[in-house]
Image (tube, rainbow, N blue to C red):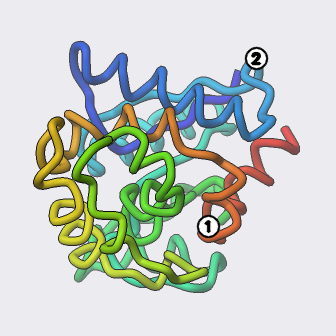
Amino acid sequence: MVKIFIEGAAKGDLSTECRQNFKAFFAKANIDMKKIDPIACGPRGIAFKRFRRSWEKRKECYLLVDSERPISDPREVWTLLSDSRNDNWPKPSGSEDRHCHLMVECMENWILSDANAVKDYYGQNFNSNLMPRRTNLETVSKQETKSKLEMATRDTTKGKYSKGAHSFKLIGLISPSIVESKCGFCRRLFNELRNL
């Protein structure tokens, strides 16, 4: 079984919720769940450390973190993460670009991809007019994404969007086919996992 070290929710119920909802998301994307094991790691730096440790022992695992900034070329994932002005994460010896995957610029861009699922989750008073209408959501900045989600949800009974309280539930509800149609880096991850 191949481990996927995911940025987000390292402890307790939130960790379980993160893991279960990523499993649901991947399963709906026609990925064989007998072959992968999503692991919620908490902060991105911890996700990288756990990935690196596992890579050194077993050589077949994946990292999934927010890019936190624009990126368009999948061949530059390790360049972006190893930049000392940013994460300063060196590419582990022997690993390839295919072992590192990004949510560009953040997980919320995947969530925004399926506006109908988000609307269904929040219900009454959700302002769908604030959802971005772009076909490529990887061009939406992290700041804009967060702002749009918070403004669109602030008058709902569930309250304003909150990372953790709402994010992982939404990952389990959104449509993978819609997400991969609007987020090329998500499609790249799915293609890698489907070919295991």
Q: Residue at x 41, y 77 (%)?
A: 132
Seen from the viewer's position, the closer of residues 153 and 167 is 153
Which mark identifies residue 185?
1
Location of residue 37 in the rendering, given as x and y in whole percent from the top left corner: 60, 24
Quick check: 72 left or right of 180? left
Vertical position of residue 88 compared to residue 118: above or below: below
- Secondary structure of the residue carrying numbered label 2: loop
In the rendered structure, which amino acid carries the disc numbered 1? Phe
Residue 74 falls in image quadrant? bottom right
Quick check: 115 left or right of 141? right
Q: Residue at x 37, y 38 (%)?
A: 121
Which mark identifies residue 34?
2
Vertical position of residue 184 compared to residue 121: above or below: below
In the rendered structure, which amino acid carries the disc numbered 2? Lys
Seen from the viewer's position, the closer of residues 14 and 38 is 14
Residue 29 falls in image quadrant? top right
Question: Does the residue at mark 2 contact the one at mark 1 (Cβ under 8 Å)?
Answer: no
- Secondary structure of the residue carrying numbered label 1: helix
Which mark identifies residue 18?
none
Seen from the viewer's position, the closer of residues 110 and 161 is 161
Binning the other alpha carbons within 10 Å of mark 1 as few (below 14), some (14 to 19) or many (20 upward) gives: many
How much space separates mark 2 and mark 1, taking CA atoms? 23 Å
Q: Quick one: which residue is furthest to the right in this view?
A: 195
Binning the other alpha carbons within 10 Å of mark 2 as few (below 14), some (14 to 19) or many (20 upward) gives: few
Location of residue 92 in the rendering, given as x and y in whole percent from the top left corner: 53, 56
Mark 2 / mark 1, whichever is N-terminal:
2
Seen from the viewer's position, the closer of residues 78 and 188 is 188
Vertical position of residue 63 compared to residue 71: above or below: above
